[in-house]
Image (spheres, grey):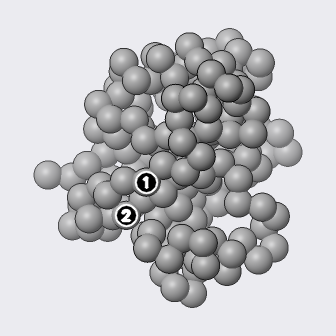
Amino acid sequence: MPLTLTVLADTHLPKRAKELPGEVWAAIEASDVVVHAGDWTETPLLDRLEAAAGRLVACYGNNDGADLRARLPLVARVDLDGVRLAVVHETGQATGREARMASLYPDTDVLVFGHSHIPWDTRTATGLRLLNPGSPTDRRRQPFCTYMTGVIAAGELEVQLHRVPPR
């Protein structure tokens, strides 16, 4: 049976938005696993995701205070149906990212990251897949707010990037 995921980062609630968009909540409720790559900014969203998600795999980001850091790791790691997943907020500048991350995460199949608010989906020379879902609440220099959904089947992850309609 396939495993379904919702992949988020940089939600920045309630500073960038008061609430996650309804379509993001619908995706969360339909998913087996929710992945969040940090920058929550306050704990109420973490509480809500822990209650709503079948399973939550998450880390803290640079904008997250001591309360979130006490509850979340810098790097979260999990095996999801044969896919070795790591979640971290920051990966540094885009130039050289693939080589740096392949070196830092040699025993990982997929690295989910955030921080830039820029959607990203690449593979390193070693096969490590790098995913950034963007932000569902703060598009910054992007034309749209975004998030990802995914399906793991037979040890492979397929993802889809979703654009959030303007508020």
Q: Amino acid at mark 2?
A: Arg
**In this view, 97 is above or below 113:** below
* Picture residue at 25% right of the left edge, 49% below the top: 3
x and y, in percent, of residue 149 in the image: 44, 45
Among numbered discs 1 and 2, the one appearing first in the sequence: 1
Residue 95, quarter of picture: bottom right
Residue 67 visible to the viewer: yes
The image shows residue 64 at horizontal and vertical percentages of 70, 30
Regarding mark 1 in the picture, which secondary structure is present there? strand
Label 1 to label 2: alpha-carbon separation: 7 Å
Q: Secondary structure at mark 2?
A: strand
Q: Residue at x 44, y 23 (%)?
A: 49
- Name the residue: 36% across, 18% down: 51
Q: Position of residue 58 (x, y in %)?
A: 50, 40
What residue is pinned by disc 1?
77
Which quadrant of the figure has residue 53?
top left
Q: Residues within 10 Å of mark 2 (few under 14, many from 20)?
A: some
Of 16 and 107, the residue lying toward us: 107
Mark 1 near mark 2, Cβ–Cβ under 8 Å?
A: yes
In which quadrant is the C terminus drawn?
top right
* Residue 1 against residue 28 in the figure, above or below: below
Please tell me which residue is depicted at 73% across the width and 47% down the height of the picture. 115
Disc 1 packing (10 Å; few <14; some 14–19; many ≥20): some
Q: Which residue is mark 2?
A: 84
Up/down of 88 relative to 145, above or below: below
Residue 36 in view, yes or no: no
Nearer to us: label 1 or label 2: 1
Q: Residue furthest left?
A: 1
